[in-house]
C-alpha cells in the first residue's frame, strides 16, 4: 500500500477533493431544495437528472478524450462543474436545477473517466488491486468528509455552494501537475446487453434493480431526511452513515464472496438490505434507528455491486471480462435514472415513508430473483470462482474495467501456481 500511495498520492488527493465536492452538492440539493419549497417530485427529477448526465458522460467522454486528449477534457469538464455549482443558489427554479444537475452529472462522470484512466495507467499488475482499494477508500472518505462540511454550514446561503466549486477547481492542481506521460486511452469493445443477460441473468437483473436502489438511497436520502424534519447536522450524519457502512462491510462481504456460493451471499445481503429498509419504515421516527438502518443499507448496496460483478465473471472467459464493463455500467445507470423518479412518486403517494418502501421492494426483489436462479443451474465450485474486487456503484466504466483486469490477473496467477513444476 505504501508503494501505491507513493506513486499515486497526488492523483488520489485530487480525486478525494472531487469526491468531497460531489458529496457536498449531492446532500445540499435535498436540503436546499426543501428550503426553496420544491416538491418531492421536483426534487426526484433533479436527482434523476444527475444520474442521466452521469450515464451520458460515461459513454461520451471516451470519444472526447480520443479527439482532444485527457488534459483538455479534464480541465474543460472540471471548469464546467465549478461554474454550474455556483449557479444553483442564483437560479432557484426546478427547471434550472434539472439542467444544472445534468451538466454536473456529465462533468463528474467525465472527470472520473479521465482521472481513473490516469490512475489505472500508474498501477502495475502487482499493485492494481491495492490501487483500486485505495481509490474506493478515498471515494468513500471524500463523501463522508463532505457531510461534515454540510453540517458546519448554512444551507440557505451561498457558501456551501461555493466550497464544492472551489474544491473542484483546486483538484486540478494535484492531478494535472502530477501527470507526466499521458496514458493511451483504449476501452474494450462493449458486450451486448443480450449477451450480458445470457451469461448471467442474475447479474443483469440485479444490476438494474440495484442501480435504482442505490440512487434512491443516496440521491433521495437528503430529500427524505429534510422532509421528515431532521436538522442539517442530522441529515449529513444520516448520509455519512450510508458510506461508513459501505466502508466497513465491503471487506467482510468480499472475504465471504471468495469462500461461498455467491448466489447465496447475494440472496443474504439483499435480504438483509430489505429487512433493514423495513425497519426504517417501521421505526422511522427514531433518529438512532435511522442511522443503524442507513449503516446497514450502505453496507449491503455497495458491496452488492462488486458481488454481482464477481458473480458474472464466474461465467465469463477472461477475454470477455473487460468487454462486460460498459454494459454493466449502462444497465446500472438506467436503473439509477429510474430509481429517484419512482421514489419521488411513491413518497408523493404514500408519504415520506415511501422512501423505505421503494428500497425495501427493490432489495427483496433482488433476493427473490437470486433464490429463483439457484434452482436454474448448479453453483460454480468455490475454487473455480473469479476474484472479488471492491468497486463503488458510482464508478465509471474505466474503474470497472480496471477491476476486471485485476480479476483476470488474479485468475492467471492462480492457474500458474496450480500448474505442475
Image (cartoon, rainbow, N blue to C red):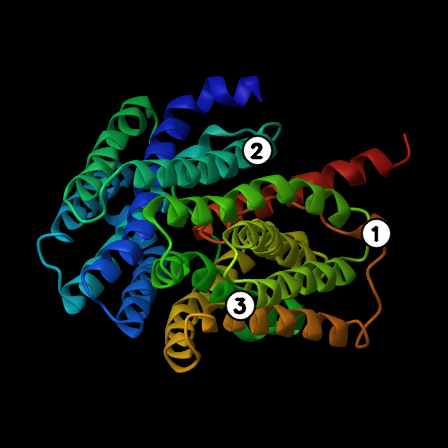
In the rendered structure, are the residues bearing label 2 and label 1 in contact, judged by CB atoms less than 8 Å apart? Answer: no
Expressed as whole percent of the image width and height from the top left, the position of residue 264 reads 78, 62
> For the point 19% across and 58% down, which residue is it?
100
Q: Secondary structure at mark 3?
A: helix
In the rendered structure, are the residues bearing label 3 and label 1 in contact, judged by CB atoms less than 8 Å apart? Answer: no
Residue most extreme to the front:
285
Expressed as whole percent of the image width and height from the top left, the position of residue 376 reads 79, 77
- Name the front one of labels 2 and 1: 1
Expressed as whole percent of the image width and height from the top left, the position of residue 256 reads 76, 47
Front residue (pair 235, 88) = 235
Q: From the image, tell me which residue sits under label 2.
A: 128
> For the point 63% across and 59% down, which residue is it?
308
What's the CA distance linking mark 3 and mark 1?
A: 30 Å
Q: From the image, tell me which residue sits under label 3.
A: 359
* Local crowd size for mark 3, using a 10 Å CA cut-off: few (<14), some (14–19), many (≥20): many
Residue most extreme to the left:
90
Amino acid at each position: 500500500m505504501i508503494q501505491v500511495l507513493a506513486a499515486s498520492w497526488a492523483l488520489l488527493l485530487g480525486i478525494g477533493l472531487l469526491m468531497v465536492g460531489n458529496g457536498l452538492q449531492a446532500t445540499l440539493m435535498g436540503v436546499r431544495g426543501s428550503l426553496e419549497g420544491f416538491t418531492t417530485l421536483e426534487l426526484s427529477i433533479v436527482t434523476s437528472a444527475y444520474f442521466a448526465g452521469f450515464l451520458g458522460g460515461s459513454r461520451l467522454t471516451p470519444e472526447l478524450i480520443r479527439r482532444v486528449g485527457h488534459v483538455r477534457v479534464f480541465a474543460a469538464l472540471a471548469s464546467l462543474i465549478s461554474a454550474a455549482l455556483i449557479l444553483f443558489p442564483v437560479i432557484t427554479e426546478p427547471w434550472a436545477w434539472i439542467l444544472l444537475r445534468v451538466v454536473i452529472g456529465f462533468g463528474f462522470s467525465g472527470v472520473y473517466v479521465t482521472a481513473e484512466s490516469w490512475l489505472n495507467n500508474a498501477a502495475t499488475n502487482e499493485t492494481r488491486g491495492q490501487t483500486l482499494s485505495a481509490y474506493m477508500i478515498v471515494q468513500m472518505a471524500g463523501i463522508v468528509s463532505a457531510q461534515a462540511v454540510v453540517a458546519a454550514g448554512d444551507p440557505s446561503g451561498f457558501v456551501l455552494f461555493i466550497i464544492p466549486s472551489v474544491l473542484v477547481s483546486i483538484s486540478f492542481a494535484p492531478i494535472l501537475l502530477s501527470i507526466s506521460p499521458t496514458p493511451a486511452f483504449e476501452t474494450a469493445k462493449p458486450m451486448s446487453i443480450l449477451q450480458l443477460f445470457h451469461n448471467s441473468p442474475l447479474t443483469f437483473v440485479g444490476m438494474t434493480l440495484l442501480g435504482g436502489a442505490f440512487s434512491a438511497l443516496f440521491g433521495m436520502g437528503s430529500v427524505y431526511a429534510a422532509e421528515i424534519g431532521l436538522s442539517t447536522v442530522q441529515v449529513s450524519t444520516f448520509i455519512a452513515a450510508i458510506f461508513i457502512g459501505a466502508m466497513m462491510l465491503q471487506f467482510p462481504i468480499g472475504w465471504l464472496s471468495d469462500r461461498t456460493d455467491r448466489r447465496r451471499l447475494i440472496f443474504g445481503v439483499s435480504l438483509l438490505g430489505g429487512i433493514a429498509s423495513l425497519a426504517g419504515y417501521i421505526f422511522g421516527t427514531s433518529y438512532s434507528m435511522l442511522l443503524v438502518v442507513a449503516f446497514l443499507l450502505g453496507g449491503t448496496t455497495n458491496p452488492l455491486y462488486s458481488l454481482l460483478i464477481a458473480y458474472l465473471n464466474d461465467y465469463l472467459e477472461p477475454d470477455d471480462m473487460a468487454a462486460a464493463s460498459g454494459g454493466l455500467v449502462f444497465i446500472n445507470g438506467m436503473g439509477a435514472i429510474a430509481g429517484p423518479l419512482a421514489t419521488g412518486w411513491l413518497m408523493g403517494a404514500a408519504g415520506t415513508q415511501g422512501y423505505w418502501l421503494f428500497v425495501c421492494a427493490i432489495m427483496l426483489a433482488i433476493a427473490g430473483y437470486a433464490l429463483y436462479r439457484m434452482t436454474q443451474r448448479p453453483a460454480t465450485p468455490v475454487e473455480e470462482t473469479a476474484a472479488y474486487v471492491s468497486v463503488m456503484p458510482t464508478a465509471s466504466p474505466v474503474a470497472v474495467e480496471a477491476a476486471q483486469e485485476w480479476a483476470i490477473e488474479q485468475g492467471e496467477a492462480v492457474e500458474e501456481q496450480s500448474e505442475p513444476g
